[in-house]
Image: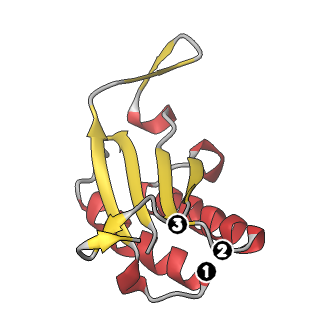
């Protein structure tokens, strides 16, 4: 079960967050061949952003996406999942694709507590 966290400045269109929460799981699930119901997505508003020594507005900031998942997927699945997440975030928030930062953290067996036990 991938767990996705998206951190970004609050978009001018508040409905963009709902679009993101609905589109990201569908996109990742399609890319890695799993059920969209197995992809959890959390969005966190960031109060301010700075990169390269410059304060950023919503239009020129880079959302940061973290995908945590068990470590049994192939490199190709991970690449497809990250690309799908980036595209869904960019589309949902109305930002350029090249501004979205995505990283995938693999969780080895025994390092996840879920469903009442260690997985």
| Mark 2 vs mark 3: in front | 3
Q: Is residue 12 visible?
A: no
- In percent of width and height, residue 48 lies at 33, 25
Q: Is 85 located above or below residue 25 in the figure? A: above
Give the mark toward the camera: 1 or 3.
3
Q: Position of residue 66 (x, y in %)?
A: 48, 51
Q: Are marks 1 and 2 in contact (CB under 8 Å)?
A: yes
- Quarter of the image with the N terminus is bottom left
Residue under circle 3? Answer: 109
How many residues crowd mark 3 within 10 Å: few (<14), some (14–19), many (20+)?
few
Number of residues whose C-alpha sits closer than 10 Å to that of mark 2, classed few (under 14), some (14–19) or many (20 or more)? few
Label 2, on which residue? 73
The residue beneath circle 1 is 32
Place residue 113 in its image quadrant.
bottom left
Nearer-N-terminus badge (1/2) = 1
Of 31 and 113, nearer the camera is 113
Q: Residues within 10 Å of mark 1 (few under 14, many from 20)?
A: some
Question: What residue appears at the point 65 percent right and 74 percent down from the top-left corner?
Answer: 73
In three-dimensional space, the C-alpha distance between marks 2 and 3, rounded to whole angstroms, equals: 13 Å
Helix, strand or loop at mark 1: helix
Label 2: state its secondary structure. Answer: loop
Q: Position of residue 37 (x, y in %)?
A: 35, 85
The tally of labels here is 3
Quadrant containing the C terminus is: bottom left
CA gap, disc 1 to disc 3? 19 Å
Image x and y of residue 75, in percent: 76, 67
Mark 1 or 2: in front is: 2
Q: Earlier in the sequence, mark 1 or mark 3?
A: 1
Q: Is residue 49 left or right of residue 100?
A: left
């Amino acid at each position: 079960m991938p767990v996705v966290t998206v951190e970004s400045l609050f978009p001018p269109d508040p409905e963009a967050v709902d679009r993101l929460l609905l589109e990201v799981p569908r996109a990742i699930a399609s890319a890695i061949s799993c059920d969209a119901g197995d992809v959890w997505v959390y969005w966190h508003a960031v109060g301010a952003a700075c990169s390269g020594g410059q304060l950023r507005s919503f239009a020129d900031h880079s959302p940061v996406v973290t995908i945590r998942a068990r470590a049994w997927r192939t490199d190709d699945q991970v690449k497809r999942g990250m690309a799908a997440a980036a595209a869904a975030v960019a589309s949902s928030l109305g930002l350029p694709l090249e501004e979205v930062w995505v990283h995938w953290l693999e969780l080895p067996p025994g390092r996840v507590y879920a469903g009442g036990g260690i997985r």
